[in-house]
Image (tube, helix red, strand yellow):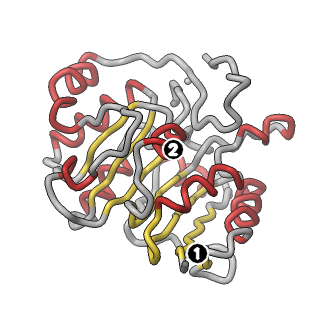
Amino acid sequence: MTEQNDSILHDENGGAVSEDPKRSIRSFVLRQGHMTAAQQRAIDTLWPQFGVDYQSSPVDLNRCFNRDNPKILEIGFGMGTATAEIAKRLPEKDFLAIDVHGPGVGNLLKLVEEQQLGNIRVMRHDAVEVVENMLADGSLDGIHIFFPDPWHKKRHNKRRLIQTPFVAKLLPKLKVGGYIHLATDWEEYAVQMLEVLQGFEALQNTAEHYAPTPDYRPETKFEARGKRLGHGVWDLVFVRKQ
């Protein structure tokens, strides 16, 4: 019951884009989703205040949020419900949330307005390019990637987001003491995630293997449904130690 929560254009997060042979990492799969009138209105009216446009040079995150607070990057937020809840639970932290799924972007902006969440900024772009070009080294206090597409078929495993080359791009963006928090409900992907993160000497696991779910991460409806069916969920929390 994996929620399609990867930042690769979706309608769950959704029809597929052709692979770009020049890019070895892509954070999304392009699918078309139905945009409701309310979601489109949220994008049209709230983007100037809460949206961040892509640029090919580093962005000043403190300026984006108008304050100097801890900054958390979230890649792949689906419909944004969990993101909004986390931001509400952690008002002292700022969240840069990236996805390419139009209805999800609109829905998160709608939640930002309804719940008066001033600590979220939204991007609609390939997260890999954002990491490569927009985020300065040492600019993040945390990274969240929850329930990325597990690409169940073995021949598609190479498309998974959590692989050594992508984590190598993320790591310099974290401050020393900053953390990366991953979650999946696909056990074989959890094993891969653990192997990838353990492969970096600069990262230290906060648990012996998998971590207890931190209090700030709410249970999604997909997660709850999976648990009722007897499926597991695995969280990994690693800290940058050098």
- Identify residue type, mark 1: Ala
Q: 137 or 91, which is in the foreground?
A: 137
Tell me the quadrant of the picture where the N terminus can be found. Answer: top right
Residue that numbered label 2 is attached to? 132
Tell me the quadrant of the picture where the C terminus can be found. Answer: bottom right
- Name which residue lies at 79% across and 41% down: 157
User: What is the CA distance from the residue labelled 2 to the residue labelled 1?
Assistant: 28 Å
Rendered location of residue 70, percent (x, y): 29, 66
Q: Quadrant of residue 125?
A: top left
- Identify residue type, mark 2: Glu
State the mark number for residue 211.
1
Q: Is residue 113 above or below residue 187?
A: above
Q: 201 or 181, which is in the foreground?
A: 201
Q: 204 or 155, which is in the foreground?
A: 204
State the mark number for residue 3.
none
Q: Is residue 168 left or right of residue 116?
A: right
- Name which residue lies at 79% across and 35% down: 156
Q: 167 or 109, which is in the foreground?
A: 167
Rendered location of residue 169, percent (x, y): 58, 53
Rendered location of residue 161, percent (x, y): 64, 45
Q: Do callouts 2 and 1 mark residues in contact (Cβ within 8 Å)?
A: no
Rendered location of residue 119, percent (x, y): 22, 53
Q: Secondary structure at mark 2?
A: helix
Classed neighbour count for the residue bearing mark 1: other residues with Cα under 10 Å, few (<14), some (14–19), many (≥20): some
Q: Is residue 204 above or below residue 64?
A: below
Q: Secondary structure at mark 1?
A: loop
- Name which residue lies at 69% across and 77% down: 209
Q: Is residue 186 left or right of residue 219?
A: right
Sooner in the amino-acid sequence: mark 2 or mark 1: 2
Q: Quadrant of residue 24?
A: top right
- Name which residue lies at 63% across and 41% down: 149
Q: Is residue 227 left or right of residue 36?
A: right
